[in-house]
Image (cartoon, rainbow, N blue to C red):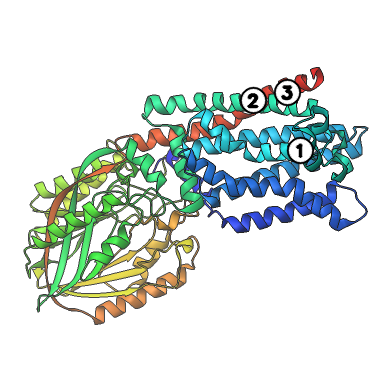
Amino acid sequence: MTATQSDLASLSRYIFRAPQWYASIAFALLIAAIAGVGAFDSQYILQDAWEGIFFIGVPTVIASVFTTPVDRRLSGQLTYNRSSLLALTCEIIVVAVLSIAGIIAALTKLDQQFVFDVLLFSLASVFAFRLLIVMAVSRTSFLVSLIPAGIQTGTAAVLFFIYSETIRVFEVGGPLVQKFLARGDKAPAALGIITPRDFIVLGIISGMYALAVYGFLVVIDRPWRRSLGVSALDFLRGFIGHIAEGTRELEDFFEQMGQQAVVPVTVLSFRREGGSEKARFVLPMIHPGPMGEIGGGNLPRRVAAQSEGLAFPPHATAGHDFNLVTEREVDTLLETAQEAYERIEYSDDASRSVRTQEGDAKLLGQAFGDDALLVATYSPEYADDVEYAVGLAAAAEARSSGLDDVMLVDAHNCNNGLQGEDIGHIYPGSERSFHMIQAAKGTAKELGMTKRGRPKLGVAWDKTEWLPADGIGPLGVRVAVLDVADQRTAYVLVDGNNMEPGLRDRIVETVEADEVEVMTTDTHIVNMVESSNQVGGAIDHDELIGLVTRLVDDATADLEPVEAGMESEYAEVTVFGNDRTETLASHANAVIAMGAALAGAVILAVTAIAVLVFFLA
């Protein structure tokens, strides 16, 4: 992950779930009642609260209830939970603006007319905000979106029209309508200042804000369409859907910008003498992201559910450009892994493990027949994802040195979060990439000369009580201990996304085995709330080390003779694509950085014009 991508990943701090529609409505009515007590001045506090509910809460309730059916009738996609949350947000905006205006009026010589003028501004602003969200979520046209967007502001305007003397001034509807709808005598005194001019001004300002929203979206959207061929509104809709209700709309956006890729899927299986599988290492050469269960974020758990033996799905040498665009692509990988598994030829011949180092790169390797498992780490130096091309080159170098098939794992076990410029990214052409390639070659040569024997395997697993918020996914901690020619090698797999600096080294020093390596799955389930939620960031290090030590002891007690075999197949999947992640991140970060400034400039310009309208009207 690069620094640009980490900035985009940090958007996960905004993740939340939209409350149920009835909860939003109840909270809106409570806020309206409190606002009514502060805004109106009758003889009874309950009367003030009721007037607040009626004049402030009723437009919110009507917007909550009717926005969704109106929007869907117009081919939109707003749900009741979203429309209720949107209406509640708009009500809070109005109440906050009115509160500030009331304080200013109390501290100055400004009168009630100033407060009502500010109310008109807030209602127009609410209309503009709703228009932005409706266009983003429902992807309807500008003119169509005006209808559901205007429900809240329109309802408030209708109530003010009826409960003021304006309806009498215009003589709307004849005597019958005047009798039943002219309710000026029932209205709070604060509404007595409303005149026909106010409704004209509200219409003009709302129109100006609507045009400003349209122009803002056109300017923001143009770079996305030119560079990625997709709309920024599609990304906004998908992101809102994902964070608010956990929908898959974000995957639809990623699928539009995705590219086809052919990736190797390697399976290393161990079976008992009776033929039943004891453990299975599965390594699709993709990145399990981008976040949560979107794309391949849940790949490790899916792999574990498919395996007969205890599954070990470590992290491959692939970065965010190899994120799957949809979870459906995981099915393709699992089918390919099953095909590779069914083609495995087993052998009872294995080598002792060897460790080589070139520069910062350290590789632990162990051969099974003519194949080998290689695990790469840069600890105690920081490192994040290893680029796809680097992994392919390193595996090819190992094969050229005598190996048939290679499972190259990125241990992904030491990083400093999202700090720095490149965050330990291992990219083609860098010195660190050549260190890995050279170490792979050296490991393969040593494996050809090391002592061999019949492998014994023991496994252990603890789901743990830790949760994704603690940096630990549902697979918990898994351990495989291999005993070959009187040498014991412990492979520790933690279901998490990278590891706090120094923790891996403490585990390696503590565990009683001849060779130890610690890996993480890089599951992005743990990144639903925080963009950086590494193993050891939220949990006690000593507790994790104690758990690993116990599991290694359990796995050692479970040792029994096994046969091992490895096979690879190739899967064609849709991934983000070459440099698409960086482009997406750059555009999104630019929108965040410049969008607020542009929106502020647009608001100031429109507000200035609106003030002139007030003076001229």
Earlier residue among tags 2 and 3: 2
Question: Where is mark 3, residue-wise?
Answer: 610
Whichever of labels 1 and 2 marks the residue nearer the N terminus, that label is 1
Q: Quadrant of residue 576?
A: top left
Task: Confirm whether residue 491 shows in the render.
Answer: yes
Q: Position of residue 119 (x, y in %)?
A: 77, 36
Mark 2 or mark 3, whichever is nearer to me: 2
Q: Which is in the foreground here, disc 1 or disc 3?
A: 1
| Rendered residue at 50%/62% (across/down) | 538
Q: Is residue 33 left or right of residue 127?
A: right
Badge 2 local density, few (<14 within 10 Å), some, or many (20+)? some
Assess whether mark 3 and mark 2 are in contact (beta carbons under 8 angstroms). Answer: no
Amino acid under label 2? Gly
Q: Which mark is residue 91?
A: none
The mark found on residue 207 in the picture is: 2
SS type, badge 3: helix
Question: Which of the two marks, 1 or 2, is nearer to us in this view?
Answer: 1
Q: Amino acid at mark 1?
A: Val
Left or right, residue 400 beside residue 391 = left
**Disc 1/disc 3 C-alpha distance (Å):** 33 Å
Where is residue 209 shown, x and y percent of the image? 64, 27
Label 1 crowding class (10 Å Cα cut-off): few <14, some 14-19, many 20+? few
| Residue, disc 1 | 177
Specify few, some or many for label 3: CA neighbours under 10 Å numbering under 14, 14-19, or 20 or more.
many
Indicate the position of residue 525 as horizontal and vertical percent values: 41, 57
